[in-house]
Amino acid sequence: MKLDRDRARRAFAAYAANYNAGDAKVALKISHTYRVAALCERIARSLPLEEPEVDLAWLCGLLHDIGRFEQLRRYGTFNDAESIDHAACSAEVLFGEGHIRDYLDEPDEDAVLETAIRWHSAYRIPEGLSARTQRFCHILRDADKIDILRVNVEVPLEDIYNVSTEALRRSAVTPAVLESFYARHCVLRTLKRTPADNVVGHASLVYELVYPESLRIAAEQGWLWKLLDFHTENAETAAVFAAMRQSMRDWLDATLQDSPKGVQ
């Protein structure tokens, strides 16, 4: 695959220009897109992969959330449960409507791109994918999860979870959510009952990261620690988060010591 990154950037900017860049949610998705593309490139280089493969990983990141703009225009929300599957919408915009040709002339990598984009937000990717396709799915999913940590720190949690500051700061962590966290699992959406549960759920995304470089990025960027430094007026919740924060640090330290650079 021969990728002209400047062309790809121009095509993405032209598509996004059809939407209101003055809307904070649109601006958020534009900045998120560029960060995820850069993270995909960094993870790909750590494996290591040849330059065309690195370009493909970068392009996965650039295109993964293109359906978010239509989702927001049609439904006024980024909440998939209240609207549409944004990953499926991204795949439809690119491959159903043919916009992928704005980025690439040749269709050689269409199948890999579509699969990675379509499944990037799913709880699990489908079984039976080739090892190569799985790799690009995992690179994209890792990069997206890493930047979601940042978004949950930079954007007020009240806006993300649609709750009042009072409700957020007084909320407790549900026992089932806490149990999932300590089992080192990504917290299922169905387990979440409180605003604090949502915070735990986003922090638990780290347990799903596949590549050592992804874990290093999550640890070094600091967004994870800021997320777990949850501001609460509930003394029990404060103690729970302090314990989770230390547990996460211990787990990351141990995991990275056992995972030499370049594994997988």
Image (cartoon, rainbow, N blue to C red):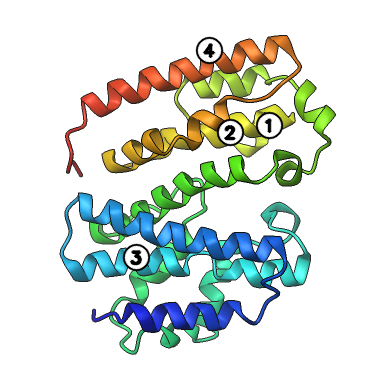
Q: Do callouts 3 and 2 mark residues in contact (Cβ within 8 Å)?
A: no
Secondary structure under tag 2 reads: helix
Q: Which amino acid lies under the numbered mark 2 shown in the image of this protein?
A: Gly
Secondary structure under tag 3 reads: helix
- Between marks 3 and 2, how big is the CA–CA gap? 27 Å
Quadrant of the drawing holding the N terminus: bottom left
- Between marks 1 and 2, how big is the CA–CA gap? 8 Å
**In this rendering, the label closer to the viewer, 1 or 4:** 4
Q: Quadrant of residue 199?
A: top right
Looking at the image, residue 70 sits to the left or right of residue 66; the answer is right
Q: Do callouts 1 and 2 mark residues in contact (Cβ within 8 Å)?
A: yes
| Residue indicated by mark 1 | 192
- Between marks 1 and 3, how big is the CA–CA gap? 33 Å
Q: Residues within 10 Å of mark 1 (few under 14, many from 20)?
A: some
Q: Which amino acid lies under the numbered mark 3 shown in the image of this protein?
A: Trp
Looking at the image, residue 93 sits to the left or right of residue 216; the answer is right
Q: Residues within 10 Å of mark 3 (few under 14, many from 20)?
A: many
Q: Position of residue 67 (x, y in %)?
A: 59, 70
| Precedes in sequence: disc 2 or disc 4 | 2
| Precedes in sequence: disc 1 or disc 4 | 1
Q: Position of residue 2 (x, y in %)?
A: 24, 81
Residue drawn at the location 69% of the way across and 10% of the way down: 236
Name the foreground residue: 84 vs 162: 162
Numbered mark located on residue 248 in the image = none
Numbered mark located on residue 243 in the image = 4
Quadrant of the drawing holding the C terminus: top left
Name the foreground residue: 191 vs 167: 167
Numbered mark located on residue 201 in the image = 2
Q: Which amino acid lies under the numbered mark 1 shown in the image of this protein?
A: Lys
| Residue indicated by mark 3 | 58
**In this rendering, the label closer to the viewer, 1 or 2:** 2
Q: Which amino acid lies under the numbered mark 4 shown in the image of this protein?
A: Ala
